[in-house]
Structure formats: structure tokens, C-alpha cells
Image (cartoon, grey):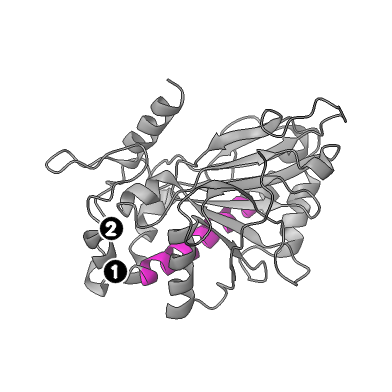
Amino acid sequence: MAAKESIQLPVLDVSQPGPETAKDLIEAVKNYGFVFIKNNHSEIPVADVDNMFALRGDFKEAFNMNEFRNGKAQQPLPPPLAENEARVNAFIDQCRLLCIRILELFAIGLEIDEKDGGKDWFSPFHDPAKGPSGTVFRTLYYPSLPASPGYDSETDIRAGAHSDYGTITLLFQRPGQPGLEILASRRGDEKEEWLSVPINPSDEANTPILVNVGDLLEYWTDGVLKSAVHRVIFPKDGIGEDRYSMAYFCHPMDDAKLEAVPSKMVREAEGRGAKGVARVEGEQVLTAKQHLDSRLAATYL
């Protein structure tokens, strides 16, 4: 059965990061794997988000862009994007910088010691100048479903249940185009169910950016930070509406070694495990590329 109520996710302001914001961020993703970020910061102005949505042109269901090199796309782009390559490159770079800010907050919240890198611990692993990565920017178009008496919320799905593979994901959505659901449990109830995610749970006019933890970060933190399963449905009241979104899937560089994050919280969680890939004592440390390949293999067996 489709979700009957919305999940209550916090909306955080990361424009001036500090210990309290970091603590709130950690608590949010430990519980649900998702959190909203206010879209009032300097990294990604609202106008830039709107301009990117305006470039969607004749997008099909999805179009992936790998990291640009020297400001240039590494694959052919459809005309609306090719004609605005510099704008697309700038937006992707803004996404990367926002991810770095969020990862700095994770490092603060996980209390990584200064001698180990402190708030900057994650940053060197996400430097595109150091090598390729699995990072992808994706435009998504979910066409409307014609009204039909045979509509079934469990079978008529826009995107099936899945978790993301990387470090974190930024999701940009449009007002009035809901459909995302998270598989989660209410506080105090271990039973998991599909809970809908509102587009904008705040009173502010700007649509917030939705952030979620990926499988790699769950693995990196030995399960302290949660990668939640989610899906996209046709809302019963909006099956005749198209849905447009954009997602930035942030990954570390391919050869980054995924030794457990040097945090007391992570050490205390050792053995809790993480989705899909076991961390076995004495085995060779996985690289980010090996972790991604293992998740892809498990998905497409």
C-alpha cells in the first residue's frame, strides 16, 4: 500500500556550519538517512536551480552526466545542455562544493580528531583533480500516467525501491511534483513502511534541497550513518502530473581506500554492518571503485 502519511524530516541551515548543525545533521541521517537543506546559501542560488530546470528540453526518463574535465563534458550532450555547457559545468561544481560542506559537517558531527583531519577528513577523497570517480549528475523526467481505473499504487511505480550507491546525493525537486517515499519506521515502532516525503515541509518559499546518505558512506561509517531505501510513486491525486527532478550523486575518487572513518562513534559501532558489502577484519581494504562495482553487481545479478 502506498504511503498514507508524510515523514517528518528536519530542514537544516548549513550556511553557517557549526557543532549544533553538525549534531542535528548526524541525528537526522542516523534515523532516516535523509534530511532537507535550506536553499538559502551561497553555493547554489535558487535562480541557478531554476535555470537548470529550464534547460531540460526534451529529456527522456533520465540523462546522466559524468564529471566534466577542464569545463568540458566527457560525452555528447543533448542540444539544450550542449548550448549551455558552461552553465551546466558551473552548476555541477556548485553541487560538489555543497557536498563538501555537508561532508565537513558530517566530520564535525562524527567528532573526527584534528590530528586525523578534523572537519576536512572527507574532502581530499572528493577532489576531482586527484582522479576519476563515480560521481554523476542526472536529470530525471517521470511522465504522467493517464487516468485509469486499473491504477495500482504498488505496481504503477515511477522508480522502484533502491538505495543510492555513493557518499551522498543531492536531490532538486519542483513544487507540486511529489512522489518520493522512504522505507522507514516511525519512532518507537520497528515496523518499516513507505512514508511519503513532502516537497517542502517548511514555511519558506524556496524549495529545500533533499540530501540522503549513500551505501558507500554507510559502509565507510560501519552503519552509523544510514542509507535508506526509497522509491518514486505516482501520487494518487497527481497521476496526471509530470515529475521533473535533478540529482547529484557524489562519490569519492575511484582509488580512495575505504578504511573506517576515524571516529569514536564508528569504532563503537564496529560489527553493526552496512548494506551490501561486509567489512572483514584482515581483508584488503576496498577502494571506492571496488565498492561501487560490488553494489552494481549485486543490483544487476
Which residue type does callout 2 highlight?
Val
Q: Quadrant of the C terminus?
A: top left
Q: Position of residue 2 (x, y in %)?
A: 67, 41
Residue tagged 1:
112
Mark 2 is surrounded, within 10 Å at the Cα level, by few (under 14), some (14 to 19) or many (20 or more) other residues, namely: many
Question: Marks 2 and 1: in contact by CB < 8 Å?
Answer: yes
The part of the chain drawn in magenta is 90-109
Q: Position of residue 29 (x, y in %)?
A: 47, 60
Q: Image point 64% across, 53% down: which residue?
A: 91
131 relative to 18, above or below = above
Task: First in sequence, mark 1 or 2: give its number.
Answer: 1
Q: Image point 54% across, 78% down: which residue?
A: 16
Q: Position of residue 4 (x, y in %)?
A: 69, 49
Q: Position of residue 90 (x, y in %)?
A: 63, 54
Q: Is residue 87 left or right of residue 182?
A: right
Q: Is residue 164 left or right of residue 202?
A: left
Residue 97 part of the magenta segment:
yes
Q: Residue 140 or 150: which is nearer the viewer?
A: 150
- The answer to whether residue 84 is visible is no
